[in-house]
Amino acid sequence: NAGVTQTPKFRVLKTGQSMTLLCAQDMNHEYMYWYRQDPGMGLRLIHYSVGEGTTAKGEVPDGYNVSRLKKQNFLLGLESAAPSQTSVYFCASRKTSVETQYFGPGTRLLVL
Amino acid sequence: LAKTTQPISMDSYEGQEVNITCSHNNIATNDYITWYQQFPSQGPRFIIQGYKTKVTNEVASLFIPADRKSSTLSLPRVSLSDTAVYYCLVAGPGTYKYIFGTGTRLKVLA
């Protein structure tokens, strides 16, 4: 039982490049979340999903897209990376009936 | 969503009890209070959750007064390894979005 895993752990992009961050959970959780955390700041919600095939915008969705084709996976895409997207990205999941989120180890992204 | 207010930072010494208070004046009837702990370069980790009165587990205690407009996370006899950021969240069943805020940065000194 690996919990929540994220791929990659670290990535450097040039401005304008695209990439996809992968989040996977093996706990059969319905809800999944993508957050970003900037230095000295709390987590801000980017997008979330309440089930397979559904996604919704969070607090800071601009510049990101997501997909949830399989229940266990939640992908975060950056179509054209900008330096302002330099951050640490955390994925989380939880069961519908339980108000406890389980977080992944994070992906550190640097956009030059 | 209930907005929460916590102290930005706190210092303590090893072996002391630490109490971190979170204010959530507009908490809804069905909302739970959840505390998370985050170490540098790691994702937040669940510590404790409660609805009212007192909850205790092997790591911490959570005190919630009758009006539920605030809550206090109590860490008994802290050690250097308790140095972390602590977040208070308020949310109820069916909540989709969460607001973490900046949390409380606890530094435990030797």
Image (tube, coloured by chain):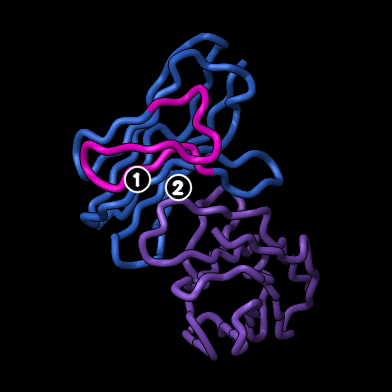
What hue does chain B carry in this figure?
A: purple
Identified at 37% across, 34% down, the residue is: A7
The chain carrying label 1 is A
Region rendered in magenta: A45-65
Identified at 61% across, 52% down, the residue is: B40
A63 part of magenta stretch: yes
A108 part of magenta stretch: no
Label 2 crowd (10 A; few <14 / some 14-19 / many >=20): some
The amino acid pointed to by label 1 is Thr
Identified at 52% across, 70% down, the residue is: B28
Task: Determine the main secondary structure of the stretch shown in magenta.
Answer: strand
Residue that label 1 marks: A5
The amino acid pointed to by label 2 is Pro
Residue that label 2 marks: A105
Label 1 crowd (10 A; few <14 / some 14-19 / many >=20): many
Q: As rendered, which of B107 and B35 lies closer to the eye?
A: B35
What hue does chain A carry in this figure?
A: blue
Asked if disc 2 and disc 1 are in contact, CB closer than 8 Å, the reply is: yes
Residue A110 to residue B106: above or below: above
Q: Are marks 2 and 1 on the same chain?
A: yes
Identified at 35% across, 52% down, the residue is: A93
